[in-house]
Image (cartoon, rainbow, N blue to C red):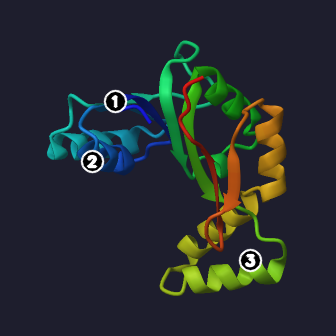
Amino acid sequence: GPRSGLVLDAGTGTARIPILICQESPDWRMIGIDLSKNMLIIGSKNIEKAGLVHQIVLQRIDAKKLPYQDGHFDMIISNSIVHHIPDPIPFLHEIRRVLKPGGALFLRDLFRPADESTLNAIVERECANDDEHQTMLFRDSLQAAFTLDEIRSMVDAAGIKGTHLYQSSDRHWTLERQWSKE
């Protein structure tokens, strides 16, 4: 891929991922967006602490209505945003629009388990040390998540081409597209 470029992190939270990427790749610039003001306040402090203010910009923006021009980004990444959006297709459309034609893509999120007993097993294992509220939030997240087939058909509907979608853990899917000179 390219030695430098501009990356969008959709649903950046406390900016942990942009910080890790920029520590590894000093020539990349990143824009992290999130709707949570609190997350972005913490994120800004984290970026300052890491000394990466010149490399990472945080903005309070809705991922379904991106203010950027077409083909603006060399790469778009997103971790665990899709299951928070009742209809992800507008978000996926926006991703396709603001990504360069040969741009790279890395999305990761939870998927909904095939049946109730699988879901229960995952919740029991993952939430062994959590209180009732945390356990409920995690269960709700899994139930709100989409199956791999649903993700695949939404990605196709949004017209995003050349992607590889796979199950990357017992509860995560990953959608990747390598950078290509188009």
Along the viewing direction, whichever of 63 and 174 lies nearer the viewer: 174
Q: Which residue is mark 2?
A: 24
Say what secondary structure mark 2 lies in: helix
Q: Are marks 3 and 1 in contact (CB under 8 Å)?
A: no
Q: Could you tell me which residue is drawn at 67 percent across and 33 percent down? A: 91
Along the viewing direction, whichever of 14 and 147 lies nearer the viewer: 147
Q: Could you tell me which residue is drawn at 26 percent across and 32 percent down? A: 27
**Which disc is residue 119 wearing?**
3
**Which disc is residue 4 wearing?**
1
Q: Label 3 crowding class (10 Å Cα cut-off): few <14, some 14-19, many 20+?
A: some
Along the viewing direction, whichever of 12 and 155 lies nearer the viewer: 155
Indicate the amino acid at tag 2: Glu
Residue 171, horizontal then vertical, whole percent: 65, 69
Q: Could you tell me which residue is drawn at 20 percent across and 37 percent down? A: 52
**Which disc is residue 109 wearing?**
none
Say what secondary structure mark 1 lies in: loop
Quadrant location of the N terminus?
A: top left
Task: State how far apart marks 3 and 2 are (Cα).
Answer: 36 Å
